[in-house]
């Protein structure tokens, strides 16, 4: 007799929106930025494809020396391993707080409104109705009580 197998959850995948990345990079360029930080595999978004999108929008990209081979097809003038990035990474990737002026980025002439670049896609397995203002928890079995 075979033991029953536990149900598997639906796979979840990260999807990168290159139109959103392009729009965010163009907005940063128009606000005065010239170089975007794409180190650490473009913040986990995938270096090679994101570098093509960001450079096509008019920004140079900063990568780590060990990642330089991943963007070898791009002209050397568009890729740097030493320049300090001046584009707000929150605005580039569409992260929370990107619509606020960035004081640490003095070159930026104005706040940049941006759209999220990464989304997660998967299947919904179930839903649960929750009352407004109350925490919604899944019931956990408790030990039997005796009275």
Image: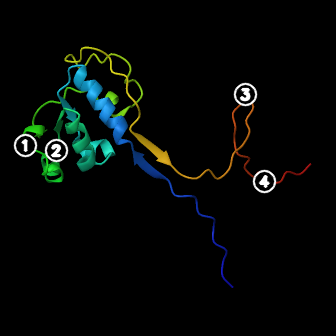
Mark 2 closeness class: few <14, some 14–19, many ≥20 residues within 10 Å: some
Q: Nearer the viewer, residue 129 or 109?
A: 109
Q: Which residue is mark 4?
A: 143
Work out whether 11 lies above or below 114. Answer: below
Q: Position of residue 53 (x, y in %)?
A: 26, 41
Q: In the visual, does 118 lie left or right of 59? A: right
Work out whether 129 lies above or below 1. Answer: above
Point out which mark residue 132 bears: 3
Mark 1 closeness class: few <14, some 14–19, many ≥20 residues within 10 Å: few
Front of the two marks 4 and 1? 1
Q: SS for tag 3?
A: loop
Residue at 33% across, 36% down: 21
Residue farthest toward the right in the current orientation of the protein:
147
Residue at 33% across, 16% down: 101
- The numbered mark, 2 or 1, whose residue comes first in the sequence reads 2
Q: Real-space Cα distance between discs 2 and 1?
A: 14 Å
| Quadrant in the picture for the N terminus | bottom right
- The numbered mark, 4 or 2, whose residue comes first in the sequence reads 2
Residue at 32% across, 17% down: 111
Q: Which residue is mark 2?
A: 64
Residue at 14% across, 30% down: 84
Q: Which residue is mark 1?
A: 76
Asked where in the image residue 37 lies, by quadrant, the reply is: top left
């Amino acid at each position: 007799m075979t033991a029953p197998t536990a149900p598997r959850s639906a796979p979840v995948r990260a999807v990168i929106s290159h139109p959103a990345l392009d729009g965010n990079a163009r907005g940063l360029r128009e606000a005065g930025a010239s170089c975007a930080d794409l180190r650490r595999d473009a913040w986990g978004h995938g270096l090679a494809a994101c570098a093509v999108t960001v450079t096509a929008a008019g920004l140079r990209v900063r990568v780590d020396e060990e990642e330089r081979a991943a963007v070898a097809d791009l002209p050397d003038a568009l890729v740097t391993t030493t320049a300090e990035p001046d584009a707000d990474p929150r605005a580039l990737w569409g992260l929370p707080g990107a619509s606020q002026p960035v004081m640490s980025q003095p070159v930026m002439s104005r706040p940049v409104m941006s759209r999220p670049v990464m989304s997660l896609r998967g299947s919904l397995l179930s839903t649960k109705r929750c009352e407004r203002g109350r925490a919604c928890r899944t019931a956990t079995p408790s030990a039997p009580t005796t009275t």
